[in-house]
Amino acid sequence: MTQLTGKIVIVTGASRVKGIGAAICRELASAGCSIFFTYWTAMIKKCLGVLNQMSLRS
């Protein structure tokens, strides 16, 4: 996925840490993309966990 390096990606629905949206965010971030994602407010603590996982990998 090297052709994705530096690209900006929008992912809607990344609320669940073990969900498809979060998995897509992690994969695209590991491929070098900048991620903009939406989430459900009640899941904010879990979303912050996803963000931390992504920032640790970059």
Image: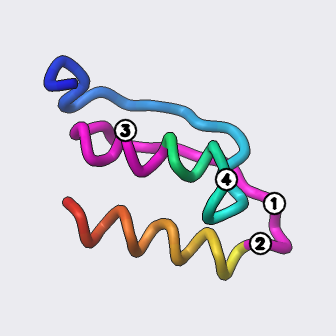
Where residue 48 appears, as percent x and y from the top left, is 55, 75
Disc nearest the viewer among 2 and 4 = 4
Answer whether labels 1 and 2 touch (C-beta < 8 Å). Answer: yes
The answer to whether 50 appears left or right of 26 in the picture is right
Between discs 4 and 3, the one toward the N terminus:
4
The answer to whether 34 appears left or right of 48 in the picture is left
For label 3, the residue is 28
Answer whether labels 3 and 1 touch (C-beta < 8 Å). Answer: no
| Residue density around tag 1, few if under 14, some if 14–19, many if 20 or more, within 10 Å | few
The CA distance from mark 2 to mark 3 is 21 Å
Disc nearest the viewer among 4 and 3 = 4
Identify the mark at residue 19; answer none if there is no mark.
Answer: 4
Give the total number of marks visible in the rendering. 4
Disc nearest the viewer among 3 and 1 = 3
Q: Quadrant of the N terminus?
A: top left
Residue farthest to the bottom?
45
For label 2, the residue is 43
Q: Quadrant of residue 39?
A: bottom right
| Residue density around tag 4, few if under 14, some if 14–19, many if 20 or more, within 10 Å | few
Kind of residue at badge 4:
Gly
Between discs 2 and 3, the one toward the N terminus:
3
Look at 50% across and 67% down and name the residue there. 50
Kind of residue at badge 3:
Leu
Kind of residue at badge 1:
Trp
Where residue 35 appears, as percent x and y from the top left, is 43, 43
| Residue density around tag 3, few if under 14, some if 14–19, many if 20 or more, within 10 Å | many
Secondary element under disc 4, as helix, strand or loop, is: loop
Q: Quadrant of the C terminus?
A: bottom left
Where residue 24 appears, as percent x and y from the top left, is 50, 40
Identify the mark at residue 40; answer none if there is no mark.
Answer: 1
The magenta region covers: 25-43
